[in-house]
Image (cartoon, rainbow, N blue to C red):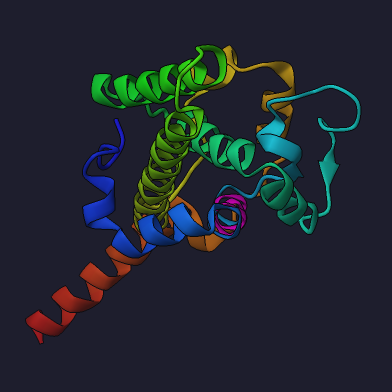
Amino acid sequence: EWQTGLCAAPCRAPCTFCCGCLLPCVVAGHQRGQILDVTGEPYVCCGGMFQCCCFGTPRDRCCMWWESCCCPGLAVGANHYLLQTRLGIQNSACDNCIYCCSCFLWCCACLCPCPDDNLMLNCADNLLFCVVGCMLAQNKIEIDHMKKEGYSGPHPKIVALLPPAQQEMINNAKIPADHSSAKLASDHSSCDGSSSEEEEE
């Protein structure tokens, strides 16, 4: 599961939560760059979730800012999807309940007649932005953990279940040495070795 749930994410990353509620496009674009830096994968629009037209081919990283500004909801969802598929994370029952309630309220606001439509839409908007802020805070905590612990690629069983386009993105990844788990393990072992030598002296 995630390092923290959606409900607890604002408390553990309050700055990211607040910025995510007010400027989700900026936070989403920044997080996409961090994810690509760690995984070493090329940039593909919306995390490669859509393969129609030219959206499934690698593009220049500058395009991720167009994506996050024009489609912030898709950008946040794509970041979430990339972290889940690369790290083998699944949502908790509470997280899924929050997502379903948010979608249900939006459907009610759009489809059901209400004497005060503005009030219904405002409630749906406020809930949606809070959920987006929680998702970005949750992403931030997971990215920080991934940087700290290192990243060596997704589990082969997960890769086998992904669409061919996602598998190609993973196969084309060039994981930086400073983010690989093997590099971090060797660094820790060398530090332990040097400290033990000092203690012996």
**Quarter of the C terminus within the rendering:** bottom left
Taking the magenta stretch, the answer to whether it contains residue 29 is: yes
Q: Main secondary structure of the magenta part?
A: helix
Residue 71's quadrant in the figure? top right
Residue 150 pos. (x, y %): 41, 52
Q: Residue at x 25, y 41 (%)?
A: 4
Point out the stretch of residues depicted in magenta. Answer: 28-36
Tell me the quarter of the picture where residue 160 sits.
Answer: top right
Q: Residue at x 59, y 36 (%)?
A: 78
Q: Is residue 152 above or below residue 194?
A: above
Q: Is residue 18 left or right of residue 70?
A: left
Residue situated furthest bottom in the rendering? 201
Q: Which residue is more in the foreground, 149 or 194?
A: 149
Residue 142, image x and y in percent?
37, 47
Determine whether 98 is above or below 149 in the image.
above
**Could you tell me which residue is drawn at 75 percent across and 39 percent down?**
45
Q: Measuring from the top left, give residue 126's x and y in whole percent.
A: 41, 42
Q: Quadrant of the N terminus?
A: top left
Q: Position of residue 127 (x, y in %)?
A: 39, 37
Q: Which of the pair 197/195 is nearer the observer?
A: 195
Answer left or right for 188 relative to 152. left
